[in-house]
Amino acid sequence: MTGVALDATAVYRPQQDSHLLIRAVRESVPVVGRRALDLCSGSGVVAMAVAGLGAASVTGFDICAHAVRYARTRASVAGARVDVRLGSWTQALECAPFDVVACNPPSLPTEPGHGDGAPPGAWGAPSTPWNGGPDGRVILDPLCRVAADMLTAGGTLLLVQSEFADIERSLRQLSDSGLDARVVLSDQVRFGTALAEQARWLERTGRLAVGRRQQTIAVIQADKPA
């Protein structure tokens, strides 16, 4: 990957949430011969996994130009047939509908002013790969509202998020949009560096028990009626 440096502030290193999302794709959704979208693609690890499962086509979108360059290089080196593009959900909608949509969006509640020096992303939040705004939902809310428009009839969205961004709210929003939404996988994981940095603030705001340093991550499956 000559000329592409791994910058942790710009490219999300695959962690438990990425691997849980890949597991959900493998276990919950038929992929072979279908048209797939990896939204908030980051390093491209999910897109490449979906391509490896036999999707007819895989398109990735991310708002970070560095991440897009990195993912394109990784896919090229790996020989994966993945089309990674710079853009947000609005650009993804222009390419819709898809049979399978996988998404690992920034869903970490982030203290106002923390990381504001980063360039603004497509949703108006700093384009760090974890910053979901003060409630973790700066991307989740618009995404859940338009998810049905991204899907073919009979299509499926798989969305992974933190408990601190209100999993039940995502389920309600997806259901309200006409999708059959439910949690299909979850796991307890230790805080990574970014969440550890927000721990004291989350404790002060009553969203985290003092001293607790684990979170639940969950994959939501939302199916569009055929």
Image: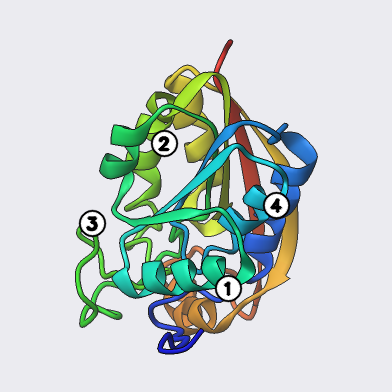
Q: Give the SS element for disc 4.
A: helix
Q: Are marks 4 and 3 in contact (CB under 8 Å)?
A: no
Q: Are marks 3 and 2 in contact (CB under 8 Å)?
A: no
Amino acid carrying mark 4 in the image: Gly
The mark closer to the camera, 4 or 3, is 4
The mark closer to the camera, 4 or 1, is 1
Counting residues from the N terminus, which is met first, the one under dot 1 or under dot 3?
A: 1
Identity of the residue drawn at 49% across and 79% down: 194
Counting residues from the N terminus, which is met first, the one under dot 3 or under dot 2?
A: 3
Is 8 situated left or right of 189 in this image?
left
Q: Which residue is mark 1?
A: 77
Q: Give the SS element for disc 3.
A: loop
Identity of the residue drawn at 58% across and 10% down: 226
Is 59 situated left or right of 34 in this image?
left
Numbered marks: total: 4
The residue carrying pointer 2 sits among few (fewer than 14), some (14 to 19) or many (20 or more) residues within 10 Å by Cα, namely many
Q: CA distance from mark 4 to mark 3?
A: 29 Å
Q: Which residue is mark 3?
A: 122
Q: CA distance from mark 1 to mark 3?
A: 28 Å
Identity of the residue drawn at 54% across and 82% down: 196
Percent position of residue 114, x then y: 30, 80
Counting residues from the N terminus, which is met first, the one under dot 4 or under dot 3?
A: 4
The mark closer to the camera, 3 or 2, is 3
Q: Give the SS element for disc 2.
A: helix
The mark closer to the camera, 1 or 3, is 1
The mark closer to the camera, 2 or 1, is 1
Amino acid carrying mark 1 in the image: Val
Q: CA distance from mark 2 to mark 4?
A: 27 Å
Q: Which residue is mark 2?
A: 144
